[in-house]
Image (tube, helix red, strand yellow):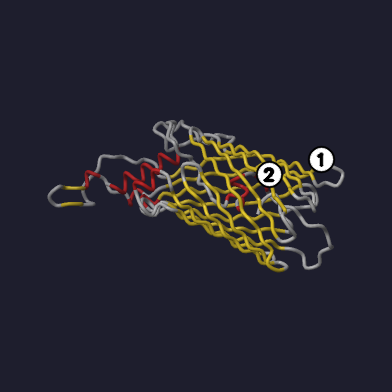
Amino acid sequence: MRTIIVTLFLIAVASLAGSRLMAQADPHFSQYYVYPSWLNPALTGAFDGDYRIAAIYRTQWGNISPFKTYGVAAEIPTNKNINLGASVLNQSANDGGYNYTTGYVSAAYTGVKLDPLHYHQLVFGLQLGFIQRRFDPSKFTFGEQWNPVTGYNPGNPVTDGLTRNSAASFDAGAGALYYDATPGKSYNIYGGFSAMHLTKPTDQFSPNGSARFPMRFNIHGGVKLTLSDILSITPNFLYMIQGPAQEKMFGAYGQLTAAPGTDFLLGVNYRVKDALTTHAGFIYKTMMLGISYDINNSDLSKMAKGSNSFEISLTFIGRKKVKTPEVEFVCPRL
């Protein structure tokens, strides 16, 4: 009985099904800056290099129904004021074999320059793709399959009819980003806004199949404070709202240059009424490894221990072997 109750609860959370459930329909990340198609498509191509490949893995709710989320994203900036990207993400829950899969292509327009030297940039992004959700009814156990004398018998007939176990919908999102990339400043500001699920995809798992995914709105920003030639601190924040659910996160991370091409990162963020997120990272030349651990302080942690979350990401930025000297690129994200 636990399996079907947990699975149906997770599906309900994932769909919101027109009710006022206090949960978001989409996965979330502590290292949200790694995956631009989730946060803001205007971040596509915002890095110093010829291409960027990033992978992220997250596991959470281990003692209830382990959620595992993993994604891969690739981006290419161009010299035509258009940056391009693509991403695939999957989230799975063991109970019921539930899977939430998305695939997007994105483009960012970088042609709006707010100063003659092109350090102040306004970027607009758009992404198109799909959402697919499915579950495996064979992994369910029903109350009718339990007998108080003989126990569980999977051969007992059930009256619950599950007529559909897969659904896919077209999806779209858009966003805007401002950032100050002026080199040599003591502070550089960045901020953005995005709206996801602009098409309000149909939730075909809802009772009558007419409910729709609520749009998700993100506001994010921060300021890079350069304290010395080797040390910077970046306070940052994220505010997200989707239907009745809200997520508020704020914190900061520090970046220390230990040697040319080698940086260490250390930070902490607080997701209000949910978790304290610790972060550590290591940058070596064109590779960045990030690790996060969420210490849950919500009501969930009171009901079940082991509800903390772990996240790891690996990013690789490719550059041409021969590169003309230039000033430091001030990136609006890691």
Residue carrying label 2: 42
Q: Percent position (x, y) of residue 66?
A: 40, 53
Q: Percent position (x, y) of residue 10?
A: 40, 44
Labels 2 and 1: the sequence-earlier one: 2
Three-letter code, disc 1: Leu
How many circles with numbers are drawn on the protein?
2
Asked if residue 29 lies left or right of residue 123, the reply is left
Residue occupying the far right of the picture: 116
Determine crowd level at label 1: few under 14, some 14-19, many 20+ residues with C-alpha closer than 10 A. few
Front of the two marks 2 and 1: 1
Three-letter code, disc 2: Ala
In this picture, is 259 found above or below 126? below
Q: Percent position (x, y) of residue 146?
A: 20, 48
Asked if residue 265 lies left or right of residue 117, the reply is left
Q: Secondary structure at mark 1?
A: loop
Find residue 222 and report its image quarter: top right
Q: Residue at x 83, y 46 (%)?
A: 118
Q: Quadrant of the C terminus?
A: bottom right
- Give the number of the disc on residue 114: 1
Asked if residue 47 lies left or right of residue 266, the reply is right
